[in-house]
């Protein structure tokens, strides 16, 4: 049987069974537009492959043999319709390809501005000048020094003059005084009282010594931070920092003088 007359027969059978197109659509899931096209024999734009498949589903739902509705004579392959919109399949692809072509043309038309080229050239020149400047500075630092420069380098730098620190004693020491030394830590000590050496050695931690002087005491400390002095009843705890060596500490009627 010819395919063009199959639609009208299917429509007649459906109506005889009291079925609507909506009923067929719900069961077969074939779009209503496709069902109307099949029953109305307006299927010239539908691919025979899809058409045969739809007719088989339709006939299966009605309990009919699809061979009675699909003829053996083939139709020419035409672009298949989009059943929901009625447009040939492939139209969207063509539009996409045309969009890609238009986009490539637009991108090809984009050219960098002239100002950008100038900026790139100036930046390259600046980098070259910076590189040359760095190399010149390195070369200047490696050049041989003159005799005058060498003489300046070889000349010894004079050490800063020692600054004396003097502390007044609260009481007059004209009639003599008592010196006491207490070791908070182990320290080497040298004591000269009125020109005579009375102690020269290490004073252990926690030990103390006392001497009587008429005029003057000369003192040297190996660790100024580990020693405390007491002149009569006046204490001197912060003579220097730990590990600092102090020489020529003088105690007389003028006070306590530390030469640094």
Image (cartoon, helix red, strand yellow):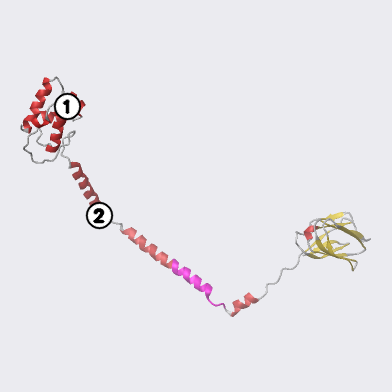
* Comes first in the chain, label 1 or label 2: 1
Q: Residue at x 31, y 59 (%)?
A: 114
Q: Is residue 93 magenta?
A: no
Q: Residue at x 24, y 51 (%)?
A: 104
Q: Position of residue 94 (x, y in %)?
A: 18, 45
Label 1 secondary element? helix
Q: Residues within 10 Å of mark 1 (few under 14, many from 20)?
A: few
Label 2 secondary element? helix
Mark 1 or 2, closer to the camera: 1
Q: Position of residue 172 (x, y in %)?
A: 90, 58
Q: Is residue 132 magenta?
A: yes
- Which quadrant of the figure has residue 256? bottom right
Question: Rounded to the nearest whole Å, what is the CA distance between mark 1 and mark 2?
Answer: 56 Å
Residue under numbered circle 2: 108
Q: Position of residue 34 (x, y in %)?
A: 15, 31
Q: Position of residue 29 (x, y in %)?
A: 20, 29
- Which quadrant of the figure has residue 151? bottom right
Residue under numbered circle 1: 61
Front-most of residues 193 and 17: 17
Q: Residue at x 47, y 70 (%)?
A: 135
Front-most of residues 4 and 248: 4
- Which quadrant of the figure has residue 145? bottom right
């Amino acid at each position: 049987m010819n395919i063009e007359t199959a639609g009208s027969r299917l429509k007649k059978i459906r109506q005889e069974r009291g079925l609507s197109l909506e009923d067929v659509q719900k069961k077969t899931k074939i779009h209503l537009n496709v069902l109307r096209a099949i029953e109305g024999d307006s299927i010239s734009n539908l691919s025979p492959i899809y058409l045969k498949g739809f007719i088989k589903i339709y006939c299966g739902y009605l309990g009919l043999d699809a061979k009675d509705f699909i003829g053996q004579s083939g139709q020419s392959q035409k672009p298949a319709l989009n059943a929901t919109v009625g447009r040939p399949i492939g139209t969207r692809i063509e539009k996409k390809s045309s969009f890609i072509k238009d986009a490539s043309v637009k991108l090809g038309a984009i050219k960098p501005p002239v100002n950008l080229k100038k900026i790139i050239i100036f930046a390259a020149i600046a980098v070259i000048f910076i590189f040359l400047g760095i190399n010149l500075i390195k070369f200047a630092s490696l050049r041989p020094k003159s005799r005058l420069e060498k003489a300046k380098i070889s000349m010894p730098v004079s050490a800063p003059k020692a600054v004396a620190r003097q502390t007044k004693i609260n009481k007059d020491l004209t009639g003599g005084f008592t010196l006491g030394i207490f070791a908070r830590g182990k320290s080497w000590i040298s004591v000269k009282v009125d020109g005579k050496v009375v102690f020269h050695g290490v004073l252990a931690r926690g030990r103390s010594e006392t001497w009587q002087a008429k005029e003057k005491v000369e003192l040297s400390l190996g660790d100024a931070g580990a020693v405390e002095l007491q002149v009569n009843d006046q204490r001197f705890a912060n003579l220097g920092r730990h590990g600092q060596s102090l020489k020529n500490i003088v105690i007389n009627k003028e006070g306590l003088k530390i030469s640094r």
